[in-house]
Image (cartoon, grey):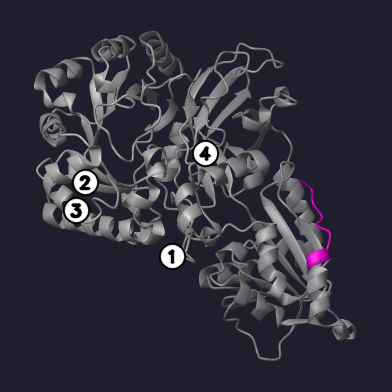
Amino acid sequence: MKALLKVGYGCNDHCTFCHTLDIREIQGSDAEVRAKIRRAKELGHTMVVLSGGEPTIRPELMAWAEYAASLDLDFGLVTNGRLLAYPDVIEELLGHRLRYVYLSLHGGSRRVHDLLVRARAFDETYGALKNLSGTGVDLHVNCVVTRRNVDKLRELVDAVLPYPDATLKMSMVEPKGGGDKHFQRMMPRIAEVAAKVADAIRYGEAQRGDAPGPHFRHGAIPLCLLPGLEDRFDDLKTHRYATMVEVGEADYFPVDDRNKLQPEPCAGCALAGPCPGLYRGYHEVHGADELRPVPSGPRANSYDYVLEALVPDRLGSDQCPLRDGGLGVTPWDRGRQLFVRHGGKLARYRAPTRDFSDVAIETTKHEVGQIYYDVSGKVAPDDFARDLVPLQRAAVCGDCPERPHCVGLHEPRLEPLFARDEAELEALLGALEGDVLDVGCGDGRSLPAMAEAARAGRLRYLGVDPDVEALASLGRAHSWARFATGTAEALPLGPAERFDHVLLLRSWNHLREPVAAAEHLWGRLRPGGTLLVVDDVPFGLARSRRATRRAQAGSAIWEHLRNDDAGAALARLRSLGGALVLRRDVGRDTSNRWILRLRKAPEAERAHGQSAANSDMEDAEPLQTG
């Protein structure tokens, strides 16, 4: 993992879009930089990357590289590369474990590049590319796309094509520093940038043919505007940066995307997890009309926390290893990192996934509390009550003033949350009487709870599922039940067949058109009948590296088409006009399962009209356990 260390903000280029345009006089001292190199080592990083400003203008550069190597750290640079036009400089840096260079090149010609950096710099920067290629350095070329070069990206691609070990990234200009000050003059529209970047990537890949490189990437552009190129996304996290520190900051902070947002149209987009969204400053000016959200598609409903380190826990239970043990509070990502104390050990995990955004992961961990340790040894847990141990904030976190912004300390919670919540659902099902339609019944978990009522003649059951083999197996095991092949949208029923209860158990988030399906099922309910909807929210799994590899090598596929919680599902169901009679939300004291139950108005109540029914949905008091 990399640590990004800003050494100062002076630079020998004068880019119009420079992030640090107004603070270029600030420089970190040699002592400060050395202390932060040491701190990177303490935090467990394997590489320290110097940035600025321009780190290569500092006379201490070689000494810092040598010092990092003496601590067994690899060395990297974010640079305009002008000093690296001199081969002897590169040779000396390679001797001090230079392993990574992120080189700024904003045009494929002197005219374009020099115009953007406001210096005669192209020959030296392009010379650095030539010199670095073939050295074994992890070599990246970054182009900031503005109005001045958006039409010249193919020219840049041509300039990079001779260097097969390079990766060219084209990034949307950020409205920060110079990008903010000169917003109107230099900020292109995001849709235009996406179109021109997509054209440049496809052009470059066509020119490259079957050759191994170079590679082409994009950054800070919403993925919905780059169909077919979603996997070419690139940012600090894909480069395995974990933390960064500015001049004058006392400690490192996690790398995050808080300078961007996913506006309202992004809600429900199938690409929302990995998508960077829009820069906040861009959205303030131009809004979100250019976005083209992808309405449906498979997505994950869980993610892994992968074990990074396991060390003895030498502190008492009333002491915090972060606050009291020297690990520090600020360097750790509040959502993506996880500390677990148990059995005299302290385990540190990290969630590298791009299937969920930083905000979604932080919500899952801290607000909803759905983090578990996987003890199953399976590719995918299938009996959550046995396979998963809940993790909760440790008692020492209690009223700690750092709690609102700290990664937190977790410990196992030895309570049968899944068994308790399953018993509640079984009680609901066991109390049903009359005609029951169970849509998406293929896993068979709902049937035992209804068997007694069915055998006593109080319940008549029809299960519907598209999986023919699963239904055949269920039919052999439950002779009292009736089964038919079909879906929520295409029920295998006669036009007059009606039910007292309709069940959507763990299938809501699998429906392609949930509102249309619910309306169709609602029409199959008799007056006074109920619709019971049960499903899960996303959760995080703490796993060893071996368990993570085993899971990733498995054949499991994504089956969810959304990750609605009870509130999101209820908002979709308001069009039905039913009365909400039960709501169980997910919280820190529950498993990851939510429940909604709606009642269709009896005939005698129909005179109140649709508006009154809608009012019931709005005003009903949620029944919560978390």
Above or below 77: residue 233: below
**Dot 4: element:** loop
Q: Gap between marks 2 and 4, in whole Å?
A: 37 Å
Please name the amino acid that badge 1 sits on.
Arg
Q: Gap between marks 2 and 3, in whole Å?
A: 18 Å
Above or below 495: residue 609: above
Please name the amino acid that badge 4 sits on.
Gly
Of callouts 1 and 4, the N-terminal one: 1
Q: Which mark is residue 215?
A: 2
**Dot 1: element:** loop
Please provide percent x and percent y for residue 62.
23, 13
Tag 1 residue: 292
Q: Which mark is residue 623?
A: none
The nearer-to-camera label among 2 and 4 is 2
Of callouts 2 and 4, the N-terminal one: 2
Tag 3 residue: 152
**Part of the protein shown in magenta:** 618-626
